[in-house]
Amino acid sequence: MVEDEPWESTGSATLAAVTPWRTFRWYKGQKHYSGTYWSSTMRDHVIYESRLELARLLFDDFAPSVRRIQAQPFLLKADVEGKIRRHIPDYLLITGDGPVVVDVKPMHRVTKREVAFTFAWTRRVVEARGWQYVVWSEPPPAELENVRFLAGYRRDWLFEGERHPEREREELRSAALHLLWAGEVVTDLSTPISSRHVLKVPQ
């Protein structure tokens, strides 16, 4: 069901509970890589429409401050320069610091005139109500690879149950990586994770 609601009075709790405005489509020759990602934050699948959106999903799922992730959350309409403009942001995040609206776009496209114009008026509308607005592009490669690797340890139920002495070393390593994903310990993610990394309890 589609409802038109005034932007200024539509609460984040309402938007966080809606279904995606649109879902991805498969067609021959498509340039984007679409799919679903099982989010440990949501305990459910979240859609993405490109590999870059998937990368953003990984980072948001990894971030301790993110409490909800909503893909394609709403169609935003605004009167800009006497014309009704429309835009569907990629993600809405409910965080400990308030709602964050996210658009994901490759760096080489961010400065294109039409894209920059859309993001500019979207930023004004979002920030006018005290929410954060983020345009996100390619992250540092090593950090992305580390977060992607740690995402393999995001399912907490795999690290419960009895220990097996003959597999204790492997289990301890897996448990440590799960703790890294869960944010219970931290380390430097700017270089590929190795046995030389030191784990610390966050302050």
Image (tube, rainbow, N blue to C red):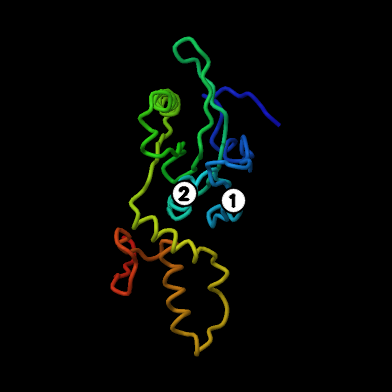
Helix, strand or loop at label 1? It is strand
Instruction: Identify the image quadrant of residue 133.
Output: top left
For mark 1, does the 10 Å Cα neighbourhood hold few (<14), some (14 to 19), or many (20 or more) residues?
A: few
Cα gap from disc 2 to disc 1, whole angstroms: 18 Å
Kind of residue indicated by mark 1? Thr
Res. 184 mark: none
- Which residue sits at x=40%, y=36%? 135
| The one of 166 and 68 positioned closer to us in this rendering | 166
Residue at far right of view: 1
Instruction: Identify the image quadrant of residue 73.
Output: top right
> Residue 32 at what x, y percent from top left?
53, 43
Res. 66 mark: 2
- Which residue sits at x=44%, y=12%? 81
> Residue 82 at what x, y percent from top left?
48, 9
> Residue 30 at what x, y percent from top left?
57, 41
Q: Which of labels 2 and 1 is toward the front? A: 1
- The quarter of the rendered structure image containing the N terminus is top right
Residue at far front of view: 29
Kind of residue indicated by mark 2? Val
Residue picked out by circle 1: 36
Helix, strand or loop at label 2? It is strand
